[in-house]
Amino acid sequence: GQEGGQNTQVAVWYGLCFVFFYLTDTLCNVPYNALGPELTDSYTERSRIYLIQNLFGNFGTMIGVCAPPALEVMGYTKQRAYAFVGALFGCFYILSMLNLVATVKERKQSGMASEIKVPLVPSMKRCFSNKAFRILLVTWFIDAVGNFGTLATAPFFLKYVIQPCNSEQKDWI
């Protein structure tokens, strides 16, 4: 009936948002994660940069976990609390990345590196002939499937397997 159609719409919406999020996440975070090696050749300094990055990331995750329930206690509905926190994090992320682009300058390329243009296909072949790269690629893929699969299915697992006592309310998921 109508509920089956609504479930299909929700599933399509969730799937599209999931794919769009990770496409944009990749577009932003691949260059961002490459920034450490671009800023310095020093292992110690690069490790310090990644430590600070991870500390801020984990602190932000804790805020993301704690803020919606705190907002609910203050009278927000669950949907408004999550929407507010999401909008706040989105604005902060955009402003942070704009600040990064405006204030951090890349190192100058050496004359030789900037002049040599390596065609895409031969460079890809060279990457895949590197044993260490192949091992990392497989492990990254397995890690990503495990992490993203868990994240994608967690709400449904909670609703349909764990079934909290108030699961009759349809506004929480």
Image (spheres, rainbow, N blue to C red):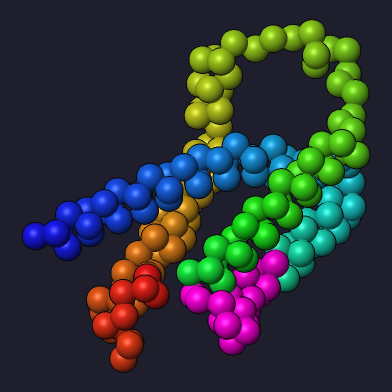
Image coords of residue 156 (percent x, y) = 31, 69
Point out the stretch of residues depicted in magenta.
60-78
The residue shown at (59%, 87%) is 73
Q: Is residue 22 above or below residue 61?
A: above
Secondary structure mostly seen in magenta is helix
**Is residue 63 left or right of 157 when viewed as pictured?**
right
Q: Is residue 65 visible?
A: no
Q: Is residue 115 magenta?
A: no
Image coords of residue 29 (percent x, y) = 65, 44
Query: Residue 27 lies in what quarter of the image?
Result: top right
**Is residue 66 left or right of 46 when viewed as pictured?**
left
Image coords of residue 20 (percent x, y) = 46, 42
Image coords of residue 161 (percent x, y) = 26, 79
Which part of the image, by quadrant, shows the C terminus?
bottom left
Q: Is residue 100 above or below residue 125?
A: below
The residue shown at (90%, 39%) is 103
The residue shown at (34%, 77%) is 158
Q: Is residue 35 above or below residue 83?
A: above
